[in-house]
Amino acid sequence: MSRTRLSAATNTWAIFQREFMALFYSPIAYVVLFLFMISNGWIFYYYCVNYARDPQQITLVIRSLFSFAFFWVLPLSPLLTMRLFSEEKRTGTIEVLMTAPVRASEVVCGKFLATQLFYMLIWSSLLLFVLMLEVLGKPAGPDWGPIKSMYFGLFFLGCMTNSLGLLASTFSRNQLVAAVLSLSGNLMFFSLLFLGWIYRETPELQRLFHYLSFQAHFSSEYIGGVVELRYIVFYLGFTSLFLFLSINMVNGRKWR
Amino acid sequence: MNSLAESRNLIEVDGLVKSYGSVKALQGISFSVGEGEVLGFLGPNGAGKSTTLRVLAGFMPGDSGRVSVNGFDVGEDSLAVRNSIGYLPEGVPIYPDMRVGEYLGFRARLKGISRADRKGRIGSALEETQTADVAGRMIGTLSRGYRQRVGLADALLGEPPVLILDEPTVGLDPEQVRQFRSLLQEVGRSRTVILSTHILSEVELVCSSVAIISGGRIVAGDTVENLKGSLVDRVCVVAEVNGPHEAVSAAFEALPGVLRVEADRPEGAGDGPGAGYCRYRVFLNDAGEGAETIFDAVSSGGWRLRQLAVEELSLEDVFLDIVGGEE
């Protein structure tokens, strides 16, 4: 029993490493990182200039930076996950991979964890800006509480969107199809807030839509600096569902 | 030979059926491969070779039928099956963005080779396949022949009792093919190998037995000697005759025991002394007096005969005979 658990861990670790390295081999990681940093850098610069005379400048700059960067939640996971399985299917490497003594769960988890780490690395680039304010803004400095809770929330949100993207990439051998699928999924969760606004007359429905949408969580997490357990349950629940479906897709492969 | 018959079967396939949608790829395939045997899986394109090997390698399930490798059922004990095989798929799909040594290290970990053994195993696999000189190179930049050999090195890594190789010599140059064959002969001594190919000479050279597959069915399966032996009473007579083409063909086909007649365009057609000659290959069932009957037919027709020879039949002829007869 412990032997199989050990081999499961080594297999997942091997897949994780290979997948994490593959992100750096492919140009897409650099392109995403470049776009992410340049767009956020510009926003940071813009608000620094804009709020220069405001007494609450640091808080305002950080809040604006994070609320604009939040839109990256939509395309980031699709871009990072689209090739995970579709590329393996297109080039046929899946055949070599799955005829090695590995379980589908190990492959799925390894790939998922590698993406998750890279996802958090990309988000952590925002900390450079915060650090700048910390160093240059003395004696006043940024309030780290909401930033911590924001990252906490981003981690769990990333779990959900990355696992959704991973599932989407098991559907097609075309990366673009996979990306569009997972982007649509993200948009669906995103647009629920507007549904909540449409149904604002019915508080039950509005509460439900708010619970299911991304932004509602984040405004409460960032502004309030609190991470609510029910949101974590929500994210992890969907993550487990998507990972479970992915494992099933890989196990029941019918592709040629 | 006897010891082969007594040893256990490492691969057993019984009534394997597989369809892709409405296309029936395999329609009830049964065969077995014993320990230390090298089975050549022979068939035209689209016959179902790759499908069979994929099911054997545990990549996809068959629709019905029993398949076991090394004593484990492919459906129920997939992990154990995959632990006992080395598989080289058609076209060698391996990660182009990894270096050869790095890739083999990754594969060695997946195959559960302990850290202590890893380096030695990778080294010997590189050596066996003569790829040590490219160990530091990116797989994507390798030539087809090298990629093929890296794929083979991967298949050999776990020292599996069963090797499944799908078209392993496609893309190799003649010298590499020769090396590959000698490697396979060496490897085949201690392991069970099943390889698919459409090159007949390969089967004659490296395989101990053959299964010919056509249209999703095994149409012949035997040792190479027996298959060729079934042709002992058949013979091919080559005759170069100068005469009206249709009349000559018709005369040959009317002879007793003739299976089929092939006619080549005349050699040195046009002007000159060779004009008008046509080379006929006549396949006869009766070994005894094939050449004599042909000669008699030519002389009674009043045509001119330039060459008359008896050819030994190769495995290729068996193959064409069997596959052709199916259609």
Image: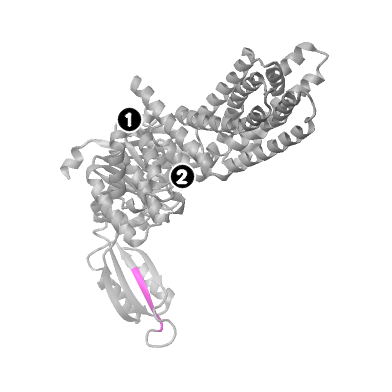
- Residue B292: in sight, yes or no? yes
Chain letter, disc 2 residue: B
At label 1, the amino acid type is Phe
At label 2, the amino acid type is Tyr
Nearer to the camera, A68 or B140 = A68
Residue A112 on image: x %, y %: 52, 30
Q: Residue furthest front?
A: A139
Residue at 83% in and 14% down: A201
What residue is pinned by disc 1? B72
Indicate whether residue B153 is drawn in magenta.
no
Judged left or right of residue B112, residue A242 is right
Look at the magenta stretch and give its main secondary structure: strand
Q: Residue furthest top?
A: A204
What residue is pinned by disc 2? B95
Please state which of the two labelled residues, at mark 2 or mark 1, is closer to the viewer: 2
Residue at 43% in and 42% down: B51
Q: Which residues are magenta?
A: B275-281
Q: Are marks 2 and 1 on the same chain?
A: yes
